[in-house]
Image: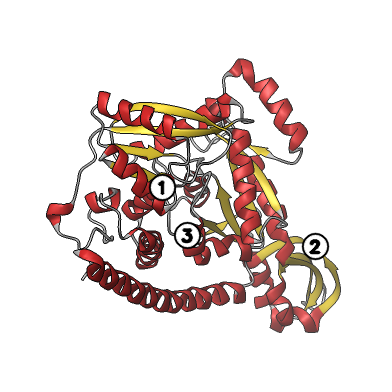
Amino acid sequence: MINTAEDNRKTVERAILIGIRPWDQDPAVAADHLAELRELVANLDIPVVGEKIVPLRLPQPEFLMGSGKAEEIAAMKTDLQADCLIFDNPLSPSQQRNWEKLVHACVIDREEVILDIFAARASTREAVLQVELARLRYTLPRLTRAWTHLSRQRGGVTGARGQGETQIENDRRLLKLRIAALDKELDMVKKQRTTGRKRRERTAIAHGAIVGYTNVGKSSLLRKLSGAGVLVADQLFATLDPTTRRITLPDKQELLLTDTVGFVRKLPHTLVEAFKSTLEEAVLADFLILVLDLASPQLDSQWETTLSVLKELGAEEKNTLIVFNKIDLVDREEQAMTFARTRALFPDSVYISTRTGEGMDTLLEHLESLAGGRRKLMHAVLPPEASRLIALAHARGVVFEESYRDDGSAEILFQTEDALRAQYEPYIVKTQGA
């Protein structure tokens, strides 16, 4: 069986972060990338005792970098008494093994850190299954590693060094069986999600998906708009499971909004694949609300990352409303310059603060316009026996004109959901596309 004995687990107490800077990359960009890795590691409560950025012209097969630089890092590890090296760049299984033999400590990469954060955040059955599947696929080619990694210290189920090749082969066989079982179970969960989506589609209510980089305020926005309890936390990947809320707009239109898992630079492909069913909310929605953190110094790179993930999902052509959040955190002296630059790039964007409520009225106006695509403007004459349809028009739409004739019939000009058209069909005078 897979070796998960407690005595093989290791708690990381002193970590060194290693970044790789391609020769043509701006040093400031490499520093930003390492800063994000530091934030990711902080979510796992791992102390960082040192950092190093290594310039690199060509990747090397043994250590990713040259052996000379590798020896420098090994000496740094000894001087700082670190027990783990964490690379911002992906390492192949053989490179991880080579590093662990060189430094006699655990060596992990960014993907493994993100996998562990996801494992810590997963709460629903679907998220737990998706994370486990991604972790097992990551672990499978690494069964011969000599050191345990973060998921083991956090109690996850992972591979470890077995007792000779026979044990490794047994572990590999069991992992493949577990992966097959998870695939089958997730297929059932996806079918349930598909049923839920079809149910939503039958309601003919417009559906928007809130997307964007992790920790830009997507969950805060959903909570502000819906007034319902939605997990809001100042941490990366606070939301893994899509949360859908029904909101009523000021013009009485109803709208479904879904908060999706946050994106991040170098989001592991295994996680993109594992969370496809969750991220498909963005693909299937009528429109997207793309939230950006206006106060973030990495605004441009976060925009590029978000577009990259949306493109991978096939959702880059969706009708999209750009929303800049956290305007209250932008220095007042810099606001004019920041607004001018972003408005030039995104002329139809909206600027808000979910904390202060600034700009929310403007956002609601845009949402009314986006949701209106599911409505039709109709002109009908309703006889007295169809008076209930007048009440329905008021309850499920917007009545612009209403008058009564001598025979008791009512003439109304109104806008309502296209799904209700059949009920008004016998009485329609003229219909216009909204």
Disc 2 residue type?
A: Ala
Determine which quarter of the picture holds residue 324: top right
Q: Position of residue 193 (x, y in %)?
A: 48, 73
The residue wearing badge 3 is 270
Q: Position of residue 23 (x, y in %)?
A: 60, 30
Disc 1 residue type?
A: Gln
The residue wearing badge 1 is 95
The CA span between labels 1 and 3 is: 19 Å
User: For mark 1, does the 10 Å Cα neighbourhood hold few (<14), some (14 to 19), or many (20 or more) residues?
Assistant: some
Kindly identify the residue that appears in the image at 73 percent across and 57 percent down: 317
Kindly identify the residue that appears in the image at 59 percent across and 18 percent down: 332
Please, which colouring scheme is shown? secondary structure
The CA span between labels 1 and 2 is: 59 Å
Observer-side mark, 1 or 3, equals 1
User: For mark 2, does the 10 Å Cα neighbourhood hold few (<14), some (14 to 19), or many (20 or more) residues?
Assistant: some
Of all residues, the one furthest to the right in this rendering is 430
Element type at marker 2? Answer: loop
The residue wearing badge 2 is 434
Going from the N terminus, do you reach mark 1 or mark 2 first? 1
Q: Is residue 77 left or right of residue 324?
A: left
Q: Position of residue 75 (x, y in %)?
A: 31, 27
The CA span between labels 3 and 2 is: 42 Å
